[in-house]
Amino acid sequence: MLSETHLETFKRDGCAVIEGFLTDEQIRALRGRIGGLLDSLEPSSHPLTTFATGTRDSRHIGDRYFFESSDKTRYFFDEDAVVDGRLAVDKQRAVNKIGHGLHINEPLFAELTHSAHTRAVAAALGYDDPRVLQSMVIFKQPRIGGAVPLHQDSSFLFTRPPSACGFWIALEDCTPANGCLEVIPGSHRYSAIAQRFVRKQTSFVAPDGEEFPDGNELVQVEPAFSLFPPERDCGQAAADAAPQPQPACVPLEVKAGSLVLIHGQLLHRSSHNHSDRSRWIYTFHIVEGAYEYDARNWLQMPAGAELTKL
C-alpha cells in the first residue's frame, strides 16, 4: 500500500498522497453513516459549541463538551453557522466536524482506522506501537467552511520526542475552490515545534474535587524535532534548522478515496470554502506508544484509559 516512492516523498516533503486508499463502496458506506449521524443530531439539546482553529481564543475553548470528547462522538459547529445562540443554517450544513472518538464508537470508522492497510502504512513509516487519537469527520461546508491557518499537528498532539502523523482521507474530491489541503513541502525538516497548544494547569479545590481547566494557552517550548522517519536523528534535524526562506503553500488537489499522510511537523493549512460544494474528509492521528504523551495536551483520555492501539 505504501510504495518506496510514497515513502521517499514523505521523507522529502513531509506528506504523501496515496490514491485509491478507499474504494467507491467504502466511500458510500462512510458517507451514509455520516448522513445518519447528522440526521440524529438534535440542536435543541446541544450546547452549540463552535470550532475554530488558530492562535486566537475560540469560543469552544474551556468547554467540557470539547475537552471531554477524546472517546466520544460529538458535534462542533462552524462559527458562521451560529448567530445569537441559534443555528443560522440547517443542521446538515452547520456542522464543522464530528469527533474525536469515531475510531472507538463508530464501527465503520473503527474498521477503516484499524484496517490491515492502515497498520501496514504505519509500520512502513517506522512505528513500533502506533496509538490512535483525535479521529473526526471535517466537513468544510459550502460557502461557510472556514479557513484553517498554517499549523503543525505536533503542536496539538505532542510526544517526547515528537511522533505525530496525520492520516487525512478524502471522502469527496478536494480542490482549491472547496478548501483542499495546502502544504509547504519539506517544512518538516526545518520547522521546529516551538509553540504548543495546551490545557491550562488544573488546580484542585476542596471539597468539590478537581476544578476543570478553564481554557487553553499557547506556550513557547525548546525547539523539538521528530524522530520519524526513524533513521533521522535529532542531531541531523537540528542541523537543518537554520533559518529558511518561507516558500508559498502548495495546494494538494486530491480525488475522493485518497489518503494524505501528514508529518507532525509539516506546516499546512486550508482555505475558506467559497464554492457551492462541500469538502468532507475523515482524519485521525497516530503517535508512537513508547513515547511520553504530554499530560498538558488538550486531548486526554479519561482517567484509567490509554490511547487506542492501532
Image (tube, rainbow, N blue to C red):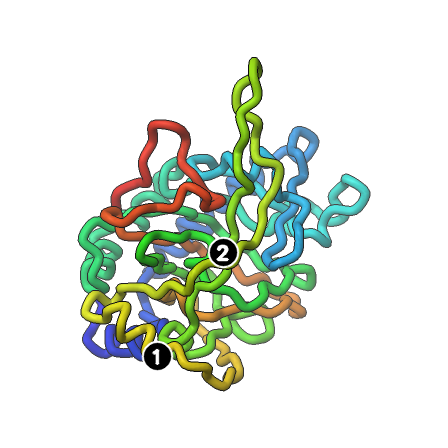
The residue at the far right in this view is 84
Residue at 26% x, 43% y: name it: 309
Nearer-the-camera pick, 240 or 252: 240
The local crowd at label 2, few if under 14, some if 14 to 19, many if 20 or more residues have their Cα within 10 Å, is many
SS class, disc 1: loop
Which residue, given by chain and number where applicable, does mark 1 sit on?
A: 240
Quadrant where the image shows the N terminus: bottom left
Q: Using the rendered image of the protein, determine whether residue 259 is visible from the camera's viewpoint.
A: no
Q: What residue does disc 2 label?
A: 196
Number of numbered discs = 2
Q: Answer with the quarter of the image where residue 63 lies.
A: top right
Disc 2 + disc 1, Cβ < 8 Å = no
In-image side of 66 versus 11 (left or right): right
Of residues 160 and 253, the one nearer the viewer is: 160
Classify 180 as above or below 185. above
Say what amino acid the circle numbered 1 marks.
Answer: Asp
Please report the residue visible at 68 percent of the width from the left and 60 percent of the height from the top: 144
Q: Residue 277 placed where, x, y %? A: 60, 65
Task: Tell me which corner region of the image, top left, top right, bottom left or bottom right, holds residue 111.
Answer: top left
